Amino acid sequence: MSLLRFDNVGLRYGVGAEVVRDLNFDIAPQSFQFLTGPSGAGKTTMLRLMLLSLRPTRGTIRIFGEDAAKLDKDQITALRRRIGVVFQDFRLLDHLTTYENVALPLRVMGRDERGYRAEVVELLRWVGLGDRMYALPPVLSGGEKQRAAIARALIVRPELLLADEPTGNVDPSLARRLLRLFVELHKSGTAVVIATHDLTLMDQFGYARRLVVGEGQLKIFEGDPP
Amino acid sequence: MNASLPPAMPPDSQLKRDMPLVPPDSIAGRALVVVIAIMTFLACLTAGGAILVAEASQGWRADVSRDVTIQIKPKPGDDVETLEAAAAGIAARAPGVADVHAYSKAESEKLLAPWLGEGLDLGQLPIPRLIVVHMQSGHREDLEPLRAALAAGAPGASLDDHRLWLSRLDTMADAVVVFAVALFALMILAMATAIGFATRGAMAGNREIIEVLHFVGAADSYIARQFQGHFLRLGFKGAAIGGAAAAAFFAVAALVLRWGGGSAGGEEIAALFGAFALGLPGYAAILAICLGIAGLTGFLSREIVFRQLRGML
């Protein structure tokens, strides 16, 4: 069973032309793929559809075996707890420390702070933010913010990770280090979807599947066998 | 993720700050506290005023309803003194009567002096005489025997039970209370509107935070609680300030009226509001209004947040 499946999905805003159309693909458990295409091609829209923050105007999205159209808000909330998401603009809460930002998904689940403290501190050290856990996002560098956003997505050990241009704001060497985080996560069993238009980066992971979106349509290129 | 952990964990005080997820300074809190305080103050004044008028009107009604008046209208040739004495005698013997006071010629002249001037000889005018009959408490309904006895024993005497005056008093007191309730409802409506604007403004200002909370798996009820707690605190603060100011106003007004009770203005206020002493039930009403307003603030903000969240995916 796939984690996520799109069948003939299309989306239009208002009465305009379809932004994306005839999307047919699935995301298998423990798979690794890049979602790519030129800027404005619809990558972010596709990620938002996967995250169920947009409803398609046609077609069917099945997520974790459920028809997304039949889910109520509480069910969507429950499913989102199985998905990690990294936003292109990080979306860290400026009034919370790095530690509090990373712990946010656990806090909203109602877990006791003492229960997850060691876990969060360990992850912060793992992503290289052990000495920045009390810092507020406005004083973090772009790369630190990026790593904090990634750590926040990883803290719940998601079954599916969606990342929108996670290396878009960092230099190539940091981009490679960050991507290694995703590879590690993938090896530990998480399906990963990374939206990027960085061809150099993708070429370093030839085994990854590529979902190429252009002019609202999707082409799929399977990766090289490892 | 199994990298070796350094032995030292950061101390509690540095990690656990209990920082609210919705930043307090992102909500126009001070303006809302001022609005709630003013509205609570006005609502408490309205309610307290209505309670005072209602209590005072009970006093007027009790006083007026215990008295009935016998009016002696002499016909030409009648001896008004004899008629008055006969009517007063009948009234004094009637059941349920506590006291009878017949106005003498001199007292009647004194009563009319403000309108007709001093030194007037009433003997030249067919001026009716009055007898005030003070009924025992609970005997107001026993007036028929007295009415019948007067018709038989004192022709020209008529009994006025002040029913018309009482019904006007009732109408006026009821109108004051209805007006106060309407005013109170309007204030609550205005306050609810202000809370609605503030909540929607706070949500618009924190839209990005709400979106992030949604994406990291926060339920609508969890997000609504973040706003509700904040607005409940603002509501308590505003209501406490407004309620305390209203309680202080009534306490000071009662003291001022006690000291200046002899003045003409003081007497007028005392006639309308009684002693202006709100009493324990009145202060309890102010406390109830404050708690109600604080609760309303929390409830309304929660409902508005829920409604807005329902439209977001």
Image: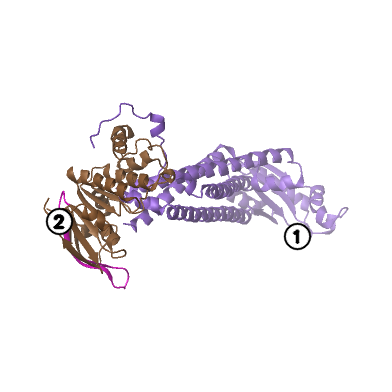
Label 2 element class = loop
Residue B56 visible in the picture: yes
Q: Is residue A12 highlighted in magenta? A: yes
Query: Of tags 1 and 2, which is closer to the observer?
Result: 2
List x then y, in percent, for residue B14. 41, 32
Q: Nearer the viewer, residue B221 or A93?
A: A93
- Residue type of the residue flagged with mark 2: Gly
Q: Which chain is purple?
A: B
The image shows residue B32, relative to residue B125, as above or below, that is above
Query: Residue A223's mark?
Result: 2
Task: Please report, as a chain letter, where disc 2 is located.
Answer: A
Q: Say above or below: B173 vs B246.
A: below
Q: Position of residue B114 (x, y in %)?
A: 81, 54
Residue linked to disc 1: B75
Find the residue positioned furthest to the right. B119
Q: Which chain is brown?
A: A
Compute the Cα span from label 1 to label 2: 124 Å
Residues at marks 1 and 2 on the same chain? no
Q: Main secondary structure of the magenta part?
A: strand
Bounds of the magenta span? A8-31
Q: Is residue A71 visible?
A: no
From the top left corner, tell me how far across and down residue B174 is, in percent: 56, 54
Seen at 22% across and 53% down, the residue is: A193
Q: Residues within 10 Å of mark 2 (few under 14, many from 20)?
A: some
Name the colour scheme. Answer: by chain
What is the three-letter code of the residue carrying label 1?
Answer: Lys
In the displayed structure image, the side of residue B129 where residue A187 appears, left or right: left
User: Of B15 and B139, which appears nearest the observer?
Assistant: B15
Residue situated in front as seen by the camera: B121 or A184: A184
Disc 1 residue crowd, few under 14, some 14–19, many 20+, Cα 10 Å: few
